[in-house]
Amino acid sequence: MPLVVLIIVGALAGVVATRLMRTETDLPTAMIIGVLGAVVGGMGFRFLMTSASWIGAFVIALLGSLLLLWVWQHYQGRR
């Protein structure tokens, strides 16, 4: 997946993920979480994807973002 597509899809997935998890973050933080989630999701689910489509890339980025947000919320809860 080209870098530009990763950034766009990841940013969108991060915004959706923060809304689904009801996390209070600003837009840049949500976008960064989404891009990092896209990287995590892409590495974790690479074997499931034989051809990268926009919908498949978005779903994987969203799952990675949700996982990253869950870990982040869990870590913040320990403070």
Image (tube, rainbow, N blue to C red):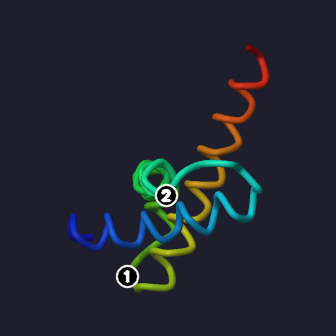
What amino acid is at disc 2? Leu
| Label 2 crowd bin: few (<14), some (14–19), many (20+), radius 10 Å | few
Which residue occupies 77% across, 16% down? 78
| Label 1 crowd bin: few (<14), some (14–19), many (20+), radius 10 Å | few
Q: Nearer the viewer, residue 54 or 51?
A: 54
Q: Residue 69: x percent and y percent?
A: 64, 45
- Give the residue pinned by disc 1: 51
Residue that sits furthest to the front in the current view: 26
Is residue 1 left or right of 13 when viewed as pictured?
A: left
Rounded to the nearest angstrom, the CA distance separating label 1 from label 2 is 30 Å
User: Would you identify the image quadrant in which residue 15 lies?
Assistant: bottom right
- Which of the marked residues, 1 or 2, is nearer the chain's N terminus? 2
Is residue 77 left or right of 57 when viewed as pictured?
A: right
- Give the residue pinned by disc 2: 27
Which residue occupies 73% across, 14% down? 79
Which residue occupies 54% across, 51% down? 26
Task: Name the secondary structure under disc 1.
Answer: loop
Q: Nearer the viewer, mark 1 or mark 2?
A: 2
Quarter the N terminus occupies: bottom left
Whether 75 is drawn above or below 64: the answer is above
Q: Residue 50: x percent and y percent?
A: 41, 77
Which residue occupies 45% across, 74% down? 57
What amino acid is at disc 1? Ser
Is residue 1 left or right of 61 when viewed as pictured?
A: left
Q: Residue 49: x percent and y percent?
A: 45, 73
Is residue 27 left or right of 2 when viewed as pictured?
A: right
CB under 8 Å between discs 1 and 2: no
